[in-house]
Amino acid sequence: MILKFFRRKSAPDAQLEQGLEKTRRGVFLEITRLFDRGVLDDDLYEELEMLLIQADVGWDVSQKLVAELRRRVERDRLVDPLAAREILREEMIQLLEGSMRNRTVKILQRGVPFVIMVVGVNGVGKTTSIAKLAAYHQGFGRSVMVAAGDTFRAAAIDQLTVWGERLGVPVIAHAQGGDPGAVVFDAMRAAHARNADVLILDTAGRLHTKHNLMAELGKLRGIVQKSVPDAPQETILVIDATTGQNGLVQAKEFSASVAITDILIAKLDGTAKGGIAFAVAKELGTPISYVGTGEKATDLAEFRPETYVDSLFFGQGEGF
Ligand SMILES: Nc1nc2c(ncn2[C@@H]2O[C@H](COP(=O)(O)OP(=O)(O)OP(=O)(O)O)[C@@H](O)[C@H]2O)c(=O)[nH]1
Ligand SMILES: [Mg+2]
């Protein structure tokens, strides 16, 4: 059994492993078996490419990964499948790290709210992810506030209020149908008045094809910047892992309208399409900072390329 020999190098992250369980069982176990067959031939490369596409790594990116693997195997005249798998691991990590280099350095300053604006298509997991991000920052001892910038649906305001009560986080909200700009304006003022370290802004789900709604995000940004010029320090685009390549299309469209600084891939636990991270990293170059791995406030993992790749190959307690 190959797992005896192929060792895990990064420290395991239980959250991430839970989130990638379906992708690992669905596809990466098959990839492990491929290399376990013992020969590096055309069939292996072909099947590997198919499996990567199945995990939603994307046609283009899968092809590039396999071509690079093949090039290195042939260049170094490798015959050991384990060595080849090690190269695949390296290539996958490198691909993800490419986009991580575009991460902006974020500094939390005392007395200046660190503003996080969360955007994305309807139902991708924005509000739930906000609860997770609130809990994440609370974990560092930061005071957090959230604002219900989604005034479109009454349920959206209630949903955020419930999370706020659960987490002990103040929620700034207006009545349904109100102006999201006014909510953001009030939230900025409240964050200053209460000395909040972090303010997270929820926004209504919007289709990337609706230009007026996309322009509204720019306006909300402007309101934030009147109060803190270099805010929002983080503009997070949430994409739903279960939608696979469609998430990539959304990400491209959103990036064209608003300056996205970070990506959060939600619902990773609900899909075997965990390969979408590779497509996003390669095609967009925007750093993936977080992944959502369930419906609870604690179901959030920081994205680390090495841990991510190792969690695709190894389940809990494996690889040591
Ligand atoms: N399994 C799983 N479910 C999630 C995750 N994140 C969100 N959800 C679920 O996805 C559904 C939609 O989540 P919301 O947070 O309401 O999504 P939204 O983007 O705010 O939706 P709109 O405001 O309507 O645009 C809810 O049932 C969440 O519990 C996740 O990481 N894993
Ligand atoms: Mg919402």
Image (cartoon, grey):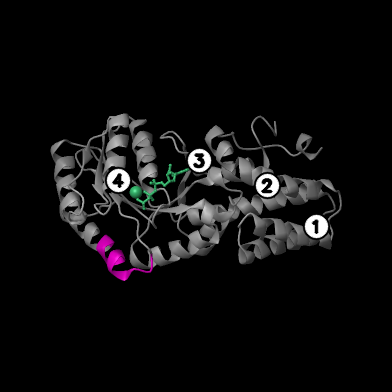
Mark 3 is surrounded, within 10 Å at the Cα level, by few (under 14), some (14 to 19) or many (20 or more) other residues, namely many
The residue tagged 2 is 26
- How many angstroms separate mark 2 from mark 3 (CA)? 16 Å
| Label 3: which secondary element | loop
- How many numbered marks appear? 4
Left or right: where does residue 203 sit relative to residue 18?
A: left
Query: For this view, does 166 lie left or right of residue 33?
Result: left
Q: Nearer the viewer, mark 2 or mark 4?
A: 4
Which residue bears the numbered disc 3?
Answer: 293
Q: What residue type is labelled 1?
A: Leu
Which residue is most to the front?
154
Residue 74 position within the rendered picture, expressed as x and y whole percent measured from the top left = 80, 61
Residue at 83 percent across and 58 percent down: it is 77
Q: Does the magenta stretch include residue 212?
A: yes
The answer to whether 63 is drawn above or below residue 117 in the figure is below
Cα separation, mark 2 vs mark 4, equals 35 Å
Mark 1 vs 2, N-terminal side = 2
Q: Quadrant of residue 256?
A: bottom left
| Ligand 1 contact, mark 3 (Cβ < 8 Å) | yes
Q: What stretch is highlighted in magenta?
A: 208-217
Query: Spatial distance from mark 4 to mark 3, Cα to Cα?
Result: 23 Å
Q: Is mark 2 within 8 Å of ligand 1?
A: no
Task: Point out the frontmost of discs 4 and 3.
Answer: 4
Between circles 1 and 3, the one closer to the viewer is 3
* C-alpha distance separating marks 4 and 1: 50 Å
